[in-house]
Image: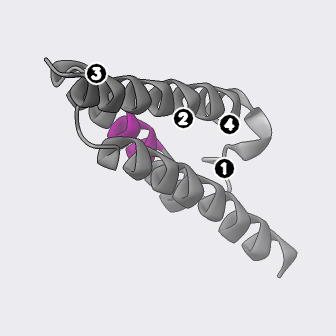
Amino acid sequence: MNTIQVCKRFITWAMGCAVAVVFAGCAAAPSQRVSYARHPNLAEAQSYIERAIDKVGDAQRANDFDLNGHAARAKVLLEQAYAEIKLAAEAANAR
């Protein structure tokens, strides 16, 4: 394995760790979760996103975090979608 490959793997691993830390904070925060009682469809969408993030993490581990940063970027976008769903629920609550 040459130096460039090692650097790429390290950068991808570091990005994955950073995303995991950020998501762990967001997912654990009850203020980000949509109430299933008030918005069952939005709450279910959030649960699908949580599962998707877990599956992307599984793929990263299975490929030694060597996915050229695409999986890490997908996780960031999934986290953004998770937050947007919360905003949608808040907008519905305001009506």
First of labels 1, 3 by sequence position: 3
First of labels 3, 4 by sequence position: 3
Image quarter in which the C terminus is found: bottom right
- Provide the residue designation for mark 1: 34
User: Does residue 65 appear in this view?
Assistant: no
Q: Quadrant of residue 53?
A: top left
The disc label shown at residue 26, or none: 4
Viewer-proximal residue among 79 and 31:
79
Q: Closer to the camera: disc 1 or disc 3?
A: 3
Q: Position of residue 75 (x, y in %)?
A: 44, 45
Graded by Cα atoms within 10 Å as few (under 14), some (14 to 19) or many (20 or more), the crowding at tag 2 reads some
Viewer-proximal residue among 19 and 47:
19
The disc label shown at residue 19, or none: 2
Q: How far apart are marks 3 and 2 (CA)?
A: 20 Å
Q: How far apart are marks 1 and 4 (CA)?
A: 12 Å
Q: Which amino acid does label 3 sit on?
A: Val
Viewer-proximal residue among 41 and 83:
83
Graded by Cα atoms within 10 Å as few (under 14), some (14 to 19) or many (20 or more), the crowding at tag 1 reads many
User: Does residue 12 appear in this view?
Assistant: yes
Q: What residue type is labelled 2?
A: Val
What is the secondary structure assignment of the residue under circle 3? helix
Residue 82 against residue 32 in the figure, above or below: below
Residue 83 against residue 50 in the figure, above or below: below
Q: How far apart are marks 2 and 4 (CA)?
A: 10 Å
First of labels 1, 2 by sequence position: 2
The disc label shown at residue 91, or none: none
* x 53%, y 27%: residue: 20
Q: Closer to the camera: disc 1 or disc 2?
A: 2
Residue 15 against residue 85 in the figure, above or below: above
